[in-house]
C-alpha cells in the first residue's frame, strides 16, 4: 500500500541501524472509511485494490485522503527491517434507558455502563516490515479491569522465490478475513459499538485464530483476494465487562447477588430470562476452525469504487456442536476527489450473515451502514442492524465524529442507539473520545 512515509523507509547501503522521525498524516478518524483498505485504511491509490481487506502486503496507516494534520512517528530500521509503533486509546460515557446496560452490548468493547466513564481499550501495537517478511502485534488493556489481552501477533512471508506469484503465508494469532468488520480493531471503527450481526455470529471479540493462512492475490489490473485459514479459535481471557457486570456499582452488585440467589433457587425473573437469552445468543467457535474469505475490489474510476466480499467459517462450539457462519457483503464508495487527495465521500456498506448452529438452527443477520465524510474534521454515520435467533432484535444508530485537529490524533464521537428488543425498546446516547498515534499497521 502506498504510504506517506514510504521514502523514509529506505536506507543508505552502509547503514545498519537508523532511527527516523517520519511525518505520518494521522487523519483516519478512527474509522472514517472503516476498512476501505485494511481494517480502516483508505490511503492512496492502492487502498481498494492491492491492499483491500488486509490482504497481501497491506497496512493500516491512519492517513487517508484527509491530508491535514500531522503527527511525528518514530521508526527504527535495522538492516532490512523496519519497526513502527502505534498507540490507541478509547473511552466512552453515556446514558441508556436499559435497566441493565450490559444487556445491550454485543461486542466486548461495547458500552456497558450507565452514566459512568468506561475504558473501551488502550491498544499498543508494533509493525514489522521488510521485502519478504511482515509482522504485527497488538493487544488491549482495560484499565477498569486491570487486564491485558493479546489480540493479534503474526508474521507473513511474501514475495519469496519458492512461493507462487501473489501467494503469501501468514502464521500466528490473527483476525480471520471474513466480512468487512471482523479484521478491524476498536480504533478503526466508525461507530461506538460493534455491528449486531458480526458480533453475535462471529464472536463478541471477533473470530480470531491461532494457526496458519494462505492468501492469493490474482494478477491483473483489478486483483481478487482468496484466503484460506485453519487453526484453533482464540480463547478470550475476559469479556471486557459486558454482559453480567462485576462490581461496577453498589446497585449492580446487589442485582448480581440477587441474581445469584435466584440461580441457586432455580427461580428466574424477567431480568434472569433476559440474561439467559443473551447467553444463548453467544454461540461461539471453539477448537479448530476453517475459514475462507474472498474479496473482489473494483474501482470503476477514481470517484466510484466497489468491493464485494464472501466468506465462511466452519467449526464447532465448546459443547461439540457443529457451527457454520456464511457471509456476503457489498460496498460502494463515491468520492469527489481522485486518489491521494481529500474530498467529500459517501460509502454504503451492506452485509448479510447466515449462522447454522446445531443447537439453535439457522439464524439470519443483516448490517447496513451509510458513512459520509463531510469535512476533514467531520464525519456522519447511519447504521441499521438486525438479527433473528434465540432473541430477535434490531438496532438503529446515528453518529457524528468530530476531529478538532483535522486528524484522528484526537477525536470525539456522539452516537444515538435505538434498540428494538423482544421485551421492549431502549434508547441510548454515547459520547466517545479517542486518541490515535503511530505509523502504518501491517495487516
Image (cartoon, rainbow, N blue to C red):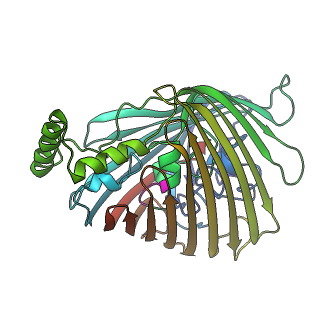
Residue drawn at (75%, 32%) of the image = 168
Which of these two is toward me, 369 or 28?
Answer: 369
Q: Is residue 253 left or right of residue 29?
A: left
Query: Where 170 sits versus 48, above or below?
Result: above
Residue drawn at (63%, 64%) of the image = 349
Q: Is residue 245 left or right of residue 188?
A: left
Residue 339 visible (yes or no): yes
Residue drawn at (50%, 62%) of the image = 385
Which of these two is toward me, 19 or 250?
Answer: 250
Split into 4 quadrants, where in the image is the C terminus? top right
Query: Where 345 sits versus 259, above or below?
Result: below
261 in the magenta segment: no
Outermost residue to the right: 220
- Boundaries of the magenta span: 192-196
Which of these two is toward me, 71 or 337?
Answer: 337
Q: Position of residue 320 (x, y in %)?
A: 51, 25
Q: Position of residue 212 (x, y in %)?
A: 65, 26
Give the total number of marks visible in the rendering: 0
Query: Where 244 sits versus 415, above or below?
Result: above
Q: In terms of secondary structure, what is the magenta stretch mainly?
A: loop
In which image quadrant can residue 41 be found?
A: bottom right
Residue drawn at (56%, 70%) of the image = 371
Residue 15 visible (yes or no): no
Q: Position of residue 53 (x, y in %)?
A: 67, 49
Q: Is residue 94 left or right of residue 203?
A: left
Q: Position of residue 114 (x, y in %)?
A: 23, 59
Amino acid at each position: 500500500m502506498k504510504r506517506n512515509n514510504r521514502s523514509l523507509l529506505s536506507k543508505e547501503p552502509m547503514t545498519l541501524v537508523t532511527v527516523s522521525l517520519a511525518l505520518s498524516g494521522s487523519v483516519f478518524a478512527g474509522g472514517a472509511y472503516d476498512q476501505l483498505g485494511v481494517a480502516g485504511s483508505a490511503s492512496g491509490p492502492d487502498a481498494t485494490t492491492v491492499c483491500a481487506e488486509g490482504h497481501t502486503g497491506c497496512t493500516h496507516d491512519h492517513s487517508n485522503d484527509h491530508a491535514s494534520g500531522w503527527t511525528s512517528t518514530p521508526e527504527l530500521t535495522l538492516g532490512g527491517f523496519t519497526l513502527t509503533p502505534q498507540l490507541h486509546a478509547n473511552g466512552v460515557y453515556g446514558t441508556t434507558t436499559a435497566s441493565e446496560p450490559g444487556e445491550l452490548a454485543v461486542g466486548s468493547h461495547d458500552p456497558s455502563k450507565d452514566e459512568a466513564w468506561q475504558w473501551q481499550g488502550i491498544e499498543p501495537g508494533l509493525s514489522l516490515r521488510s521485502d519478504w517478511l511482515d509482522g504485527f502485534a497488538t493487544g488491549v488493556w482495560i484499565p477498569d479491569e486491570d487486564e491485558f489481552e493479546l489480540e493479534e501477533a503474526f508474521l507473513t512471508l511474501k514475495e519469496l522465490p519458492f512461493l507462487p506469484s501473489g501467494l503469501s503465508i501468514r502464521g500466528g494469532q490473527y483476525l480471520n478475513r471474513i466480512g468487512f468488520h471482523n479484521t478491524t480493531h476498536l480504533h478503526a471503527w466508525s461507530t461506538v459499538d460493534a455491528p449486531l450481526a458480526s458480533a453475535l455470529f462471529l464472536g463478541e471479540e471477533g473470530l480470531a485464530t491461532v494457526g496458519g493462512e494462505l492468501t492469493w492475490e490474482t494478477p491483473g489490473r483489478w486483483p481478487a483476494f482468496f484466503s484460506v485459514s485453519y487453526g484453533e479459535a482464540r480463547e478470550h481471557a475476559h469479556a471486557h465487562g459486558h454482559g453480567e457486570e462485576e462490581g461496577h456499582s453498589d446497585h449492580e452488585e446487589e442485582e448480581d447477588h440477587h441474581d445469584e440467589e435466584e440461580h441457586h433457587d432455580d427461580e428466574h425473573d424477567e431480568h434472569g430470562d433476559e440474561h439467559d437469552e443473551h447467553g444463548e445468543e453467544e454461540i461461539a467457535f471453539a477448537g479448530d476452525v476453517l475459514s475462507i474469505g474472498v474479496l473482489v475490489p473494483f474501482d470503476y474510476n477514481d470517484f466510484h469504487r466497489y468491493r464485494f466480499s464472501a466468506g465462511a467459517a466452519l467449526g464447532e462450539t465448546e459443547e461439540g456442536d457443529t457451527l457454520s457462519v456464511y457471509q456476503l457483503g457489498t460496498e460502494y464508495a463515491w468520492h469527489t476527489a481522485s486518489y491521494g487527495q481529500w474530498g467529500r465521500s459517501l460509502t454504503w456498506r451492506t452485509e448479510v450473515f447466515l449462522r447454522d448452529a446445531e443447537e439453535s438452527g439457522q439464524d439470519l443477520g443483516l448490517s447496513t451502514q451509510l458513512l459520509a465524510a463531510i469535512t476533514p474534521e467531520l464525519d456522519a454515520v447511519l447504521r441499521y442492524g438486525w438479527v433473528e435467533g434465540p432473541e430477535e432484535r434490531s438496532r438503529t444508530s446515528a453518529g457524528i465524529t468530530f476531529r478538532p485537529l483535522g486528524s484522528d490524533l484526537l477525536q470525539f464521537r456522539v452516537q444515538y442507539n435505538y434498540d428494538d428488543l423482544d421485551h421492549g425498546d431502549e434508547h441510548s446516547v454515547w459520547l466517545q473520545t479517542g486518541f490515535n498515534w503511530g505509523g502504518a499497521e501491517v495487516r
